[in-house]
Image: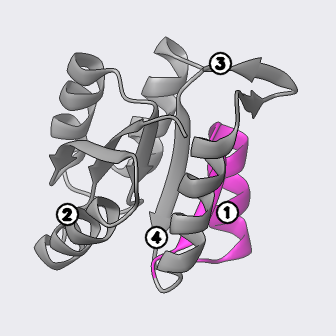
Amino acid sequence: MKELRVVAADDSLLIRDFLKRALSSIKSCNLVGLAAEGEEALSLIRLLRPDVIVLDVSMPLKNGIQVLREVRQEDFDVIIIMFTGDTTPELKRLCLEAGANYFVNKGEFRMLSAILTQLQQQSCVRVNDQCVNS
């Protein structure tokens, strides 16, 4: 099982603490960076070059969709999971069209955990029908 390096960003201290605890409970999942707003998230992503990014949609300075778009302009291989309380179909469509690999409701942490576990077990990750991170 490969180790996944994860950067997560959420403006809620409660959610950041939850993510920190929850991600540390997933074997071979290493939370390498935790940001409270979009600009900080971009800095950590550029510095740490994670395998996976978990992004809240609503954050100060730059929202998650702005961060998603900037990351996709620089690096298409990283896996991006939008982790949000707003699960409207329009927002989901917008995030996926902007380049998110997954869109997960904050109330469904098991789904986030399942995605990360699945990514660890793959010898590569499929992005736009190409094998990356092998």
x%, y% of residue 30?
30, 44
The label nearer to you, 2 versus 3, is 3
Q: Residue at x 60, y 66 (%)?
A: 114
Q: How many marks?
A: 4
Q: Quadrant of residue 122?
A: top right
Mark 4 highlights which residue?
84
Please give the residue where the numbered disc 3 appears in the rendered image.
134
- How crowded is the residue under tag 3: few (<14 C-alpha within 10 Å), some, or many (20+)? few
Amino acid bearing label 2: Asp
* Front position among marks 3 and 1: 3
Dot label at residue 92: 1
> Which of 117 and 40 lies nearest the eye of the viewer?
117
Q: Earlier in the sequence, mark 2 or mark 3?
A: 2
Any part of residue 38 in sight: yes
Q: Residue furthest front?
A: 1
- From which residue to which does the magenta span run? 86-106
57 left or right of 87? left
Task: Give the amino acid at mark 3.
Answer: Ser
Q: Earlier in the sequence, mark 2 or mark 1?
A: 2
Q: CA distance from mark 4 to mark 2?
A: 11 Å
When the figure is inspected, residue 24 is found, relative to residue 2, above or below; the finding is below
Kindly identify the residue that appears in the image at 75 percent across and 29 percent down: 127
Residue type marked 1: Lys
